[in-house]
Image: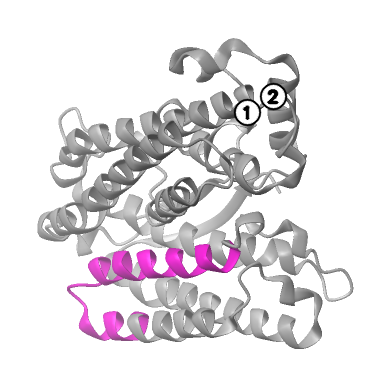
């Protein structure tokens, strides 16, 4: 099952607007894409080392390394193409939304059987994707149901296996993006992109779908409806990261939007102002798990934040896209 798979129909209706995308693409890759994946790889290396040094779920060093690595993943998680898609790496790092509760089931199954897959990275990589990645590690570190499930020895081995698997996927992404960068900045030939326009539309799609996911899923899922809010559906709520993911995503997408609009100062100004409003609202919420959606006043503030994100999307689709010669059509999410 694939979650978070965005399908964005993008066309280039204004071929007369074709231009040299090279400088903008190079700047985005050198300043936005590659540094992000390098930082992720560094952080997951630290996470693995922390798990090997002390695998106790309550270890301050392990939890700090978990938070740092998760921060760095969220900051590049909108770049879901190329090396991020290879071997389902993005899903292996972040299996969410988990609408059927597969992650706790996968973890419980591994623990109950004391599955030997934890003994080698190759074997663990063949286990259920739901029992891998940051959300599986979050449950092992923060969910009380796993505090005494199985033996201490096996829980330790499982935590270490998850951390190692996260690191291997992050390192693979980082290494592959180094070479894939050429496909974006020098399209044609063996590149999957025939032109700079196609490469640009991939990055524009990352901006639009990143905003959509943050507004509609990161906020929309816990909001539910007014009569039936769903705060327990908030992303990474066990480790108090729900609101943090919204903020980190907006900060990363703001940087991407600035690069995309670099040649159009008026649009860049509009986008920056809209992002500033949304980020300021997120930072003022003081509601780490978005539990406030269950309270009318708290819900109103989350709705205001969601509207701020929708305002950014509107600028991207009505100002930035047409100016770049890109029009976004139907957006859809695969999964609920």
Q: Secondary structure at mark 2?
A: loop
User: Would residue 52 be counted in the magenta stretch?
Assistant: no
Q: Is residue 314 left or right of residue 158?
A: left
Q: Position of residue 320 (x, y in %)?
A: 34, 72
Which residue is drawn at the image coordinates 26% and 86% (left, top)?
A: 266
Q: Position of residue 111 (x, y in %)?
A: 70, 23
Which residue is drawn at the image coordinates 48% and 81% (left, top)?
A: 278
| Dominant secondary structure of the residues highlighted in magenta in the image | helix
Does residue 299 appear anywhere in the picture? yes
Quadrant the N terminus occupies:
top right
Label 2 sits on residue: 151
Using the image, tell me which numbered label, if any, was put on residue 155: 1
Which residue is drawn at the image coordinates 11% and 54% (left, top)?
A: 22
Q: Is residue 200 left or right of residue 179?
A: right
Q: Are marks 2 and 1 in contact (CB under 8 Å)?
A: yes
Q: Position of residue 126 (x, y in %)?
A: 54, 16
* Span shown in magenta: 242-271
User: Would residue 250 be counted in the magenta stretch?
Assistant: yes
Does residue 235 appear anywhere in the picture? no
For disc 1, the neighbor class at 10 Å (few under 14, some 14 to 19, many from 20) is many
Q: Is residue 128 left or right of residue 124?
A: right
């Amino acid at each position: 099952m694939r979650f978070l798979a965005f399908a964005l129909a993008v066309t280039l209706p204004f071929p007369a607007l074709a231009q040299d995308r090279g400088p903008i693409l190079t700047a985005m890759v050198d300043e936005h894409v590659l540094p992000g994946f390098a930082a992720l790889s560094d952080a997951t290396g630290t996470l693995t080392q922390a798990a090997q040094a002390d695998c106790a779920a309550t270890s301050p060093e392990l939890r700090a390394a978990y938070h740092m690595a998760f921060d760095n993943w969220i900051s590049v998680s909108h770049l879901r193409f190329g090396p991020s898609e290879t071997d389902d790496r993005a899903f292996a790092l972040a299996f969410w939304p988990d609408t059927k509760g597969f992650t706790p089931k996968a973890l419980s199954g591994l623990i109950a059987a004391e599955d030997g897959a934890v003994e080698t990275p190759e074997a663990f990589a063949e286990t259920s994707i739901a029992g891998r990645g940051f959300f599986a590690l979050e449950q092992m570190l923060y969910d009380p149901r796993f505090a005494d499930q199985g033996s201490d020895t096996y829980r330790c081995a499982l935590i270490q296996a998850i951390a190692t698997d996260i690191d291997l996927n992050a390192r693979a992404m980082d290494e592959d993006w180094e070479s894939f960068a050429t496909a974006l900045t020098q399209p044609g030939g063996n590149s999957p992109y025939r032109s700079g326009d196609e490469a640009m539309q991939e990055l524009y799609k990352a901006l639009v779908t990143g905003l959509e996911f943050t507004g509609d899923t990161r906020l929309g899922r816990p909001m539910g409806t007014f009569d039936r809010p769903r705060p327990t559906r908030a992303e990474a709520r066990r480790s108090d990261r729900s609101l943090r993911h919204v903020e980190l995503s907006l900060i990363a997408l703001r940087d991407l939007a600035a690069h995309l609009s670099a040649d159009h100062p008026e649009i860049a100004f509009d986008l920056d102002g809209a992002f500033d409003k949304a980020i300021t609202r997120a930072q003022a919420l003081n509601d780490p798990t978005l539990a406030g959606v269950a309270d009318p006043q708290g819900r109103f503030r989350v709705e205001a934040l969601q509207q701020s994100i929708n305002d950014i999307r509107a600028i991207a689709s009505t100002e930035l896209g047409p100016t770049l010669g890109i029009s976004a059509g139907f957006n859809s999410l695969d999964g609920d």
